[in-house]
Structures are given as structure tokens and as C-alpha cells.
């Protein structure tokens, strides 16, 4: 039986990637696509005309809606000459969807909120809607809050959680160093100044510690967050204390069995240069642990300290948890099995 999906932000940065991925799933139907009359609509229609000219498969959901007035919707339909027919939200019935993924830019009031109020199925917001919704970062979900509104934990959580999941039953303390992309705008700086800027950021620390603590019972400390422009990945360094005696090879083995994670083999000189274009172009899993950095130290008769470094490809880390959410919330799949299925689709 098909899973019917509604997607708000259908043509946005995240929404367009998610729509392309979901369209490849054999049992998923993009039932509803919702967007606004903005540059994302123009890009969607340009792509639609190009695909249609080549006889390709439609890039639209079965039903397309614009979060605009009747007059604007009529004008858009007249302008694009029948390639697709858009409807106003007054004609929307979310009951036709088994799940709704809200991938639109955060912080905007929109008419869809009134539809959400009466919708009985799960609605999945993105990280930017904090603190709205019940936090999830597969395979974990907030347990002290109910309701049908969920919120993805963002790229940092999506990168950390699969690395910690194999040790969740014995986890005591985690220290995190993070190097990430700078995503702000500085119009008053030259390109050279922006590219070469180095920032130490404190604002991320309390939020990361809070949300990890909601999902995993352990003590978390974000030691440092550094931002560098032009990066296409994050670099994550973890120091983990577990209530268990464990060796480095066992750590690597558990990480290899964890969904979303690959362990890069050791090199002869103990270093490794990761080619991130393989992650981007060849469908490699988005969390790459550098094998030569995995070290363990026994700190008591029952406790071990683990050190490791991982590269996170953040664009995939934004898309894949939403696919997992469909499997978990709409198909009632086991979270680990849901993530592993998503991984197999990546690697196929």
C-alpha cells in the first residue's frame, strides 16, 4: 500500500531535494506539493519545462497548491499555460496525506497552520521551527512530549546521534568539538575577507547540549564551535566516556553497524584525506569516521574513553532524516531498520 506524502516548501532548497528522493521510492506517492509565488516557483517551472521537453517524468506532486490569493493563483495558471494547475489552500484536504513534511523556510505565518490544527496525521517541521514540535533525530525521539507535531533536530544532531547510538546503553559523558560552515551574510565584506574569516561561536553550544540531552541520557559538553565559510561539510571531534571496557576495533565495528555511518580505513601513516566529492557524487553515506582517529583509553576497571573524528556532509544530513521520518511515523517501522533501508537506497 502506498504512503501518501504532503510536502510544504516543495520547490525550496530542502524541499526540492526531498521531492526528488521521495519520487524514487517505489511505495511513496507525492500527493500534495505546497509552495509560494517566489523564486523557488520560477526555478521549479523552468525545470518542469526542460524535463517535459525531453519527455521526462513530471516533477510535480499529484496535487499542487500555492499559498497565495485566488487572484495570484489564477494569474500563475494563466502564465504557465497548462503545464500544471495550481490550487488555492481553500481546496486542500490534508486527510488525503498519511504524513506532511514541512520543509519551508521557518518563521513565516501561513494559511496552512489552520489545516494543521485539524489534521490527524504526523506533521514534521524542520530544525528552524525550534522549539515547536516534538524533537526527533533518528533513531531517537523525545519521549516526554506527545502530539502529532514533530521537529527534526538539524544537521548537527543528525551527525552526532548515529555516532552515539551504538553506545547509548553505556554512555556517560560526551565532549564535542565542531567545525562547520558559516551560513551568514556579510555584504560589507569583500569576497576574500568572507572566505578567509574564522569564527568561534558560542551561540550553538546551549542548544546542542539541550537537544542531545533530551534524546540521550548522558552529560554533554560542546567545547568549541568554529565556523569557516565555503565548507561543504562539518568536521566533528568526539570524546566519549562509556561505562564499559571496549577496544578501538570494537568501537569501529559498532560504528560500521550503525546506520548513516561509514568508517574510512586506516592509512599507512595514520592520516587520511577524505575526498568529499565521493560523498556528494557517488551516494556515499554522509557520516565518515576517519579510522585512524578512533582511539580508546581505559580510565577505570569499568570505564573507557573513546576519541574519534568524523566528516559530516550536511546536505544529505538534512534530507535523509525526513525520509526516515516517513518510514517511522507513517509506516511504523523500527527506527534503526528505517535508517538502514534509507541507507541501502543511497548505496543502490
Image: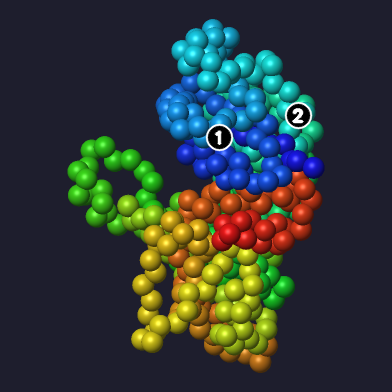
Residue visible at 25% across and 48% down? 194
Q: Dot 1: few (<14), some (14–19), or many (≥20) neighbours within 10 Å? A: few
Q: Which residue is mark 2?
A: 96
Q: Is residue 167 left or right of residue 297?
A: right
Q: Of helix, strand and loop, which one carries label 2?
A: helix
Marks 1 and 2: which is nearer the front?
1
Residue visible at 62% across and 60% down? 344
Residue visible at 39% across and 55% down? 232
Vertical comparison of 285 with 18: above or below: below
Question: Is any atom of residue 8 visible in this view?
Answer: yes
Give the camera-side residue of 254 and 193: 254
Q: Is residue 95 left or right of residue 188?
A: right
Q: Position of residue 129 (x, y in %)?
A: 58, 39
Q: How many marks?
A: 2
Vertical comparison of 64 with 192: above or below: above
Q: Of helix, strand and loop, which one carries label 1?
A: loop
Give me the C-alpha separation between circle 1 and circle 2.
23 Å
Q: Position of residue 73 (x, y in %)?
A: 55, 13
Q: Is residue 200 left or right of residue 95?
A: left
Q: Position of residue 146 (x, y in %)?
A: 78, 45
Q: Which residue is mark 1?
A: 57
Give the camera-side residue of 168 and 29: 29
Quadrant that contains the N terminus: top right
Q: Is residue 154 left or right of residue 335?
A: left
Name the quadrant containing residue 137: bottom right
Quadrant that contains the C terminus: bottom right
Amino acid at each position: 500500500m502506498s504512503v501518501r506524502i504532503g510536502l510544504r516548501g516543495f520547490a525550496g532548497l530542502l524541499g526540492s531535494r526531498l521531492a526528488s528522493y521521495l519520487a524514487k521510492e517505489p511505495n511513496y506517492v507525492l500527493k500534495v506539493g505546497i509552495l509560494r509565488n517566489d523564486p523557488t516557483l520560477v526555478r521549479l517551472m523552468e525545470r518542469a519545462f526542460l524535463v517535459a521537453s525531453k519527455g521526462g517524468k513530471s516533477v510535480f506532486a499529484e496535487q499542487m497548491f500555492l499559498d497565495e490569493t485566488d487572484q495570484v493563483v489564477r494569474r500563475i495558471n494563466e502564465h504557465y499555460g497548462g503545464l500544471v494547475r495550481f490550487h488555492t489552500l481553500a481546496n486542500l484536504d490534508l486527510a488525503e496525506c498519511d504524513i506532511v513534511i514541512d520543509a519551508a523556510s521557518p518563521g513565516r505565518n501561513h494559511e496552512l497552520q489552520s489545516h494543521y490544527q485539524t489534521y490527524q496525521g504526523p506533521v514534521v517541521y524542520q530544525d528552524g521551527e525550534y522549539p515547536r514540535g516534538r524533537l526527533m533525530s533518528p533513531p531517537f525521539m523525545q519521549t516526554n512530549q506527545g502530539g502529532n507535531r514533530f521537529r527534526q533536530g538539524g544537521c548537527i544532531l543528525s551527525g552526532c546521534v548515529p555516532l552515539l547510538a551504538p553506545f547509548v546503553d553505556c554512555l556517560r559523558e560526551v565532549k564535542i568539538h565542531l567545525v562547520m560552515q558559516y551560513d551568514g551574510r556579510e555584504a560589507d565584506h569583500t569576497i576574500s575577507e568572507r572566505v578567509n574569516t574564522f569564527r568561534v561561536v558560542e551561540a550553538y553550544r546551549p542548544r546542542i547540549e539541550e537537544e542531545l540531552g533530551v534524546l540521550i541520557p548522558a552529560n554533554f559538553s560542546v567545547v568549541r564551535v568554529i565556523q569557516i565559510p565555503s565548507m561543504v561539510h562539518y568536521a566533528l571531534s568526539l570524546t566519549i566516556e562509556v561505562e564499559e571496557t571496549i577496544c578501538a576495533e570494537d568501537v569501529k565495528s559498532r560504528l560500521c553497524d550503525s546506520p548513516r555511518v561509514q568508517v574510512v580505513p586506516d592509512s599507512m601513516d595514520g592520516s587520511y584525506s577524505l575526498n568529499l566529492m565521493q560523498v556528494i557524487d557517488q551516494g556515499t553515506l554522509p557520516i565518515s569516521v576517519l579510522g585512524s582517529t578512533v582511539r580508546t583509553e581505559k580510565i577505570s576497571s569499568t570505564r573507557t574513553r573513546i576519541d574519534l573524528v568524523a566528516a559530516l556532509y550536511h546536505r544529505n544530513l538534512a534530507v535523509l532524516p525526513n525520509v526516515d521520518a516517513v518510514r517511522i511515523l507513517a509506516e511504523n517501522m523500527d527506527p534503526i531498520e528505517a535508517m538502514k533501508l534509507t541507507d541501502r537506497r543511497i548505496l543502490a
